[in-house]
């Protein structure tokens, strides 16, 4: 509470509302506790989680490399060789990774390009978390958003440049928002658990987009393979550093949106409602807030942000939608929201970091023939360590504190 | 009319019953419009029902397309009328099933007009497609009845498919592969249990992590290992075991009793888990832990131990489901070969209302939609296969939203338990 770095401490904790203890306990178990972040949680635990992830990733690399395994097999004869071989392998892989993502202006541009949709997607999941909702559906929302955005991108070509880009971005937001509205509405009206509904909507969205890709409206003329018409020139996000680099205005939009979400969450009434409902829906209800309405609004905004992720990738990089358009952004988004501690600023940092991993992985594969999929393994490990702060504390022997305990996310099927 | 419909015993409201009746009527109109009028008169649909290996060869069934569709539509309309007029009480869902069946049969008659449809082949592929779904759903039932959400079925299956393939190829024995698959499932089950019970990580996050981890690790390892050692990815497949006598029964034999070991294990597991869960002391304890852990603890049940046990068991069953992909079906590991079937299994578990037999039924239904979707192109039906593939997901949303019946999870599902 007395930490000046924590903007949330300025507001009264929602648990001040008198409710029966059992009810409050239940709500705490079902929601996301938002109070009591200290520097240890904000900086130290994510950093250690990342280091632990990179370390275990290195172990996976070492124990799947035939040559290095061979030198481990002859450990008895030459113990130094096994260690030095392992070290060389890991060092080469990670240095190729970071050189590929930070080593040159072009590499940095590529890193920002891969981070841009991740910022939007991470914000989507983080925003929903704040309202106590688990949006696993960013993947589907992103695809639907990309579809509506591409439609606006190739149809409204009569609009002047800046207006057209804005219209296409808004179309992407609306598409994602529609896909987010469904689980929000169903949760508010019928209590259907948003996790189940969003999982199912991911696949429905994917299949629906696959269907649309083959339809008359979207398919590129003269092509039989499923790829949409390209967006008009006027709908493309302008490059920031000339045509030579792919980094585009989408990144600035992402930063602006992150700022807007921070304001919304921590400086507006709506945000206060989100956080109260997220912490303790029963208290929010007693305080006269519309819990159902908050769920719907949070899911609409969350879906819209995921839709923007699709739109930014479309209008800034790909210019058309095709099968495999989203390379797992929806799942990365969950990792990002956790790594960024569901705070917009944290999400931006986490997204830049994942951008480094993503854009460096290709260079790593080229240099060391280690498959890019190792990145996915590292990301999964990072989520484990982030989701189980106790585990990180145990490994690194950090003193446990009561407040960090509350920060563990928890949800339930049963409503 | 309203007085007759009042006081429905089945618990569904009068208004709901009427709406359902209207849905039945709409389905029957659909049958009349698309399938009866859509079939030119004089055409007949032929269904092949025999593999030629039975005691008695069943002759091909040949039906006049339009009259059959008209007949089925009339039944549906009649049931719809009765539903509006007086309702069916607690048999409502049975009637719903009957109407949907009429619709599907009419569709098949229409799709197969002037052609021959290998009905036997389709039903048999339905069963095969239902195998990983059923086993995956059983894994979910085991975990969730004890109060631990398992959305990691997908990741467990994928990992087991990989380890099954690599172990069977390396050692040259399918049984070792099967055991390795089950063991890797158990290991991931243990991981889920430790994360959610020991470290009280949110169970959905824990499951998501396992899914991401499994996809990353198997893709990584298959790219790394199989590219240079292709012989490690040729495990072969379990051969078909014909059950003596039973496999010779017309229609039923070739579908149910002429399969490989996985299918028989599936029957056994459905029966065993259904019995154990609802007829034994063990099952009662598990369900108590899933519904009200505090009460269970008070009477001396070791809540956490039951949860550990069940999640590991669930992991083993999911491992069996995964091994089916490489050792029972394809005979090779491909990157991301489960392709979301773990989530359809989750859907089957929910649609089957957390009951083994219900899950089996749901899996068969989803398997049927899948195998039908595969036949559409051959039958030249102008329906995009995507819409049939969507069916399991749509049905699940309807079920959790309470549009058609209501699925209620175990009360403590997903809640970590701490002893006070």
Image (spheres, coloured by chain):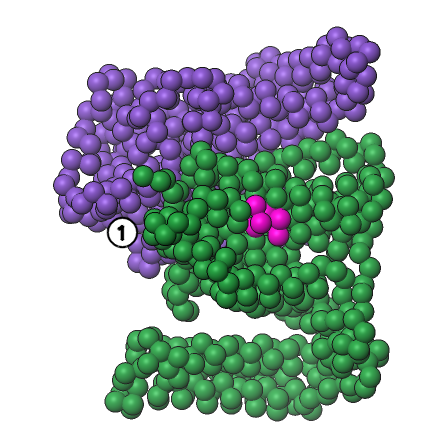
Chain colours: A purple, B green
Question: As rendered, which of A116 and B212 lies closer to the eye?
Answer: B212
Question: As rendered, which of A350 and B292 lies closer to the eye?
Answer: B292
Residue A204 vs residue A411: left or right? right
Q: Residue at x 83, y 41 (%)?
A: B171
Give the quadrant of the C terminus of chain B. top left
Query: Residue B381 appears at what percent x and percent y?
Result: 65, 71
In reply to whether residue A413 is colored magenta, the answer given is no
The chain containing the residue under callout 1 comes to A
Query: Residue B79 appears at what percent x and percent y?
Result: 45, 87
Report which quarter residue B333 is drawn in. top right
Residue labelled with disc 1: A292
Mark 1 surroundings within 10 Å by alpha-carbon count, few (fewer than 14), some (14 through 19), many (20 or more): many
Q: Residue at x 78, y 15 (%)?
A: A75
Give the quadrant of the N terminus of chain B. bottom left
Does residue A226 sit above or below A238 in this rendering? below
Helix, strand or loop status at disc 1? helix
Q: Residue at x 45, y 60 (%)?
A: B284
Number of numbered markers: 1
Does residue B74 sit above or below B210 in this rendering? below
In reply to whether residue B313 is colored magenta, the answer given is yes
- Image: magenta residue range: B312-317
- Magenta span dominant secondary structure: helix
């Amino acid at each position: 509470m007395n930490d000046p770095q924590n903007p949330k401490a300025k507001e009264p904790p929602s648990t001040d509302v008198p409710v029966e203890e059992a009810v409050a306990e239940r709500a705490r178990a079902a929601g996301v506790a938002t109070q009591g972040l200290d520097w240890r949680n904000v900086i130290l635990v994510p950093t250690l989680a990342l280091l632990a992830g990179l370390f275990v990733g290195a172990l996976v690399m070492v124990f799947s490399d035939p040559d290095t395994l061979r030198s481990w097999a002859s450990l008895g004869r030459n113990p130094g060789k096994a260690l030095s071989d392992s070290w060389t392998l890991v060092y080469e892989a990670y240095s190729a990774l970071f050189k590929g993502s930070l080593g040159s202006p072009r590499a940095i541009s590529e890193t920002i390009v891969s981070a841009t949709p991740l910022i939007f997607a991470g914000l989507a999941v983080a925003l929903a978390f704040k309202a106590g909702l688990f949006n696993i559906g960013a993947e589907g929302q992103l695809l639907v958003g990309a579809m509506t955005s591409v439609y606006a991108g190739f149809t409204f070509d009569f609009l002047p440049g800046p207006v057209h880009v804005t219209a296409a971005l808004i179309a992407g937001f609306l598409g994602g928002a529609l896909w987010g509205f469904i689980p929000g509405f169903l949760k508010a009206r019928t209590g259907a658990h948003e996790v189940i509904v969003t999982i199912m909507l991911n696949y429905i969205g994917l299949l629906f987009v696959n269907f649309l890709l083959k339809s008359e409206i979207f398919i590129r003329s003269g092509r039989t393979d499923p790829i949409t018409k390209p967006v008009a020139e006027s709908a493309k996000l302008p490059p920031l550093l000339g045509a030579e680099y792919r980094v585009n205005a989408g990144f600035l939009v992402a930063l602006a949106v992150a700022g807007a979400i921070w304001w919304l969450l921590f400086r507006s009434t709506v945000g206060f409602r989100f956080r109260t409902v997220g912490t303790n829906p029963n208290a929010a209800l007693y305080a006269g807030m519309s819990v159902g309405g908050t769920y719907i609004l949070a899911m609409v905004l969350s879906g819209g942000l995921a839709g923007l992720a699709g739109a930014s990738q479309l209008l800034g990089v790909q210019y058309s939608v095709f099968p495999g358009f989203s390379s797992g952004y929806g799942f990365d988004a969950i990792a990002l929201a956790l790594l960024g501690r569901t705070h917009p600023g944290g999400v931006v940092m986490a997204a830049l970091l994942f951008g480094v991993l993503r854009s460096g992985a290709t260079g790593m594969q080229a240099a060391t023939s280690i498959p890019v999929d190792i990145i996915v393994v590292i990301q999964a490990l990072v989520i484990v360590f982030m989701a189980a702060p106790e585990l990180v504390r145990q490994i690194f022997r950090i003193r446990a504190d009561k407040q960090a305990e509350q920060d563990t996310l928890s949800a339930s099927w049963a409503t | 009319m309203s007085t007759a419909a009042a006081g429905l015993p089945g618990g569904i409201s009068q208004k709901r019953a009427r709406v359902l009746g209207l849905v039945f009527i709409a389905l029957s109109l659909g049958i009349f419009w698309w399938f009866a009028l859509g079939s030119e008169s004089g055409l007949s649909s032929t269904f092949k029902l025999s593999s030629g290996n039975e005691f008695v060869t069943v002759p091909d069934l040949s039906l006049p397309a339009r009259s059959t569709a008209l007949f089925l539509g009339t039944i549906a309309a009649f049931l719809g009328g009765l539903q509006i007029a007086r309702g069916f009480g607690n048999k409502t869902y049975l009637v719903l099933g009957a109407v949907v069946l009429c619709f599907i049969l009419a569709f098949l008659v229409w799709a197969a007009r002037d052609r021959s449809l290998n009905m036997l082949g389709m039903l048999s592929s339905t069963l095969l497609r239902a195998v990983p779904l059923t086993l995956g759903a059983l894994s979910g039932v085991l975990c969730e009845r004890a109060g631990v959400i398992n959305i990691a079925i997908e990741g467990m299956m994928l990992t087991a498919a990989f380890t099954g393939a690599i172990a069977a190829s390396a050692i040259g024995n399918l049984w070792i592969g099967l055991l390795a698959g089950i063991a890797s499932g158990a290991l991931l089950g243990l991981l889920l249990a430790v994360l959610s019970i020991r470290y009280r990580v949110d169970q959905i996050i824990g499951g998501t992590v396992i899914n991401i981890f499994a996809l990353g690790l198997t893709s990584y390892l298959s790219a790394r290992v199989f590219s240079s050692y292709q012989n490690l990815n040729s495990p072969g497949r379990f051969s078909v075991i014909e059950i003596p006598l039973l496999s010779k029964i017309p229609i039923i034999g070739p579908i149910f009793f002429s399969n490989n070991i996985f299918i028989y294990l599936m029957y056994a597991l459905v029966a065993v888990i259904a019995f154990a869960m609802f007829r034994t002391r063990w099952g009662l304890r598990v369900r108590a832990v899933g519904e009200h852990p505090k009460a269970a603890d008070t009477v001396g049940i070791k809540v956490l131990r039951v949860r550990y046990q069940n999640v590991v068991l669930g992991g083993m069953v999911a491992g069996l489901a995964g091994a089916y992909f490489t050792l029972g079906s394809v005979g090779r590991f491909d990157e991301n070969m489960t392709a979301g079937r773990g989530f359809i299994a989750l859907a089957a578990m929910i649609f089957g209302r957390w009951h083994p037999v219900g899950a089996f039924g749901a899996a068969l239904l989803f398997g049927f939609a899948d195998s039908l979707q595969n036949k559409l192109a051959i039958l030249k039906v102008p329906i995009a296969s995507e819409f049939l593939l969507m069916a399991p997901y749509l049905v699940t949303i309807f079920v959790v939203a309470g549009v058609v019946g209501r699925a209620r999870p175990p009360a403590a599902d997903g809640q970590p338990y701490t002893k006070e």
